[in-house]
Image: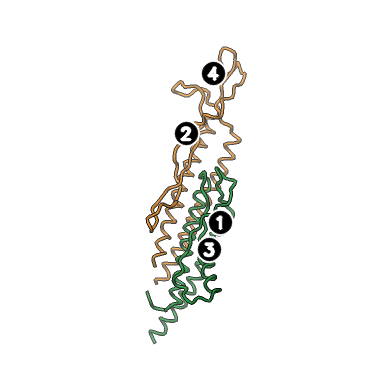
Amino acid sequence: MEIGGDRAQLLIKLMSATALRDRWISSNIANQSVPGYKRRDVRFEELLQERIARKEPDLLSVEPEIKVDTSPGSGPEGNNVNLELETTKARENRLMFELYAAIFQNRMDLIQAAITK
Amino acid sequence: MSGINNLFSGMRISSSALSAERTRIDVISKNIANAESTSMPDGSGPYRRQVVNFTPILERALDGSQTVGGMKVGSITPDTSTPFPVLHDPSHRDHDAQGNVTMPNVNVVSEMADLILAMRSYEANLNAQDNFVKMAERALRLAQ
């Protein structure tokens, strides 16, 4: 889908990365009692910001990174899932998704209005 | 929108954990119910505590590598490390020649603590699944 240009593409990638992050938060919550399981993080916004800080114009080629958190844990065999942390992240992540979706919707509505004039 | 496919795998992850935690709750309930069962119907002596062992579900990622998805019950095994407590009670139906009774190796207080943890975990997975559904609904509304 090329309608909307680069900004729309970036929003789609942001929503996509947020969906991926939610999948891994669910995985963390599901595996909170599994011996030896280490929690995962999904990094995307930080990677984008790094590119922006280095003044590189190409943001659309950034892919989300799934990172295993190797820090020690107090759970069975070093399981480091913290339920409160995961729940908070889930809520925060959901709000970000709503935000991106709203901006995307807004943009599509504007384009729709322009096309139908 | 290839990333949107990830939304549905998330739901399966949560539901696998819900199923596994339910099994854990059932096993804990069985332990508590049998805390005083000094002789099993098959004549094998006192009830032996059962333990649920969880294991991650491995799935294939888009690039072909193995990755963790949900969670499942790997096995339900008898607890052979906790000894059977022996009480002295000559009035008990199952006492031996010395008036001692071998009780099941179930500590009810410990089982209750496990039950609370299991229920908390169940609830967290339920909320995670609900979160997913709401996000998917939001994504679907974009197409309207």
What chain is tagged by disc 3? A
Q: CA distance from mark 3 to mark 1?
A: 10 Å
Which residue is depicted at the point 48% across and 69% down?
A14
Relative placement, left or right, of B60 versus A35 is left
Image colour for chain B is: orange
Task: Give the amino acid at mark 1.
Answer: Thr
Q: Nearer the viewer, residue B60 or A56?
A: A56
Name the amino acid, label 4: Asp
State the residue position of label 4: B94
Q: Nearer the viewer, mark 3 or mark 4?
A: 3
Q: Earlier in the sequence, mark 4 or mark 2?
A: 2
Find numbered disc 2 in the image and state the secondary structure of the residue it sits on. strand
Percent x, y for residue B11? 44, 55
Q: Chain of mark 1?
A: A
Res A87 label? 1
Quarter holding the C terminus of chain B is: bottom left
Disc assigned to residue B36? none
Nearest to N terminus: mark 3 or mark 1? 1
- Residue B74 is drawn in which quadrant? top left
**Do the residues at pointers 3 and 1 share their chain?**
yes
Residue A29 position in % (x across, y down): 52, 52
Q: Chain letter of disc 4? A: B
- The green-coloured chain is labelled A
Spatial distance from mark 3 to mark 2, Cα to Cα? 38 Å
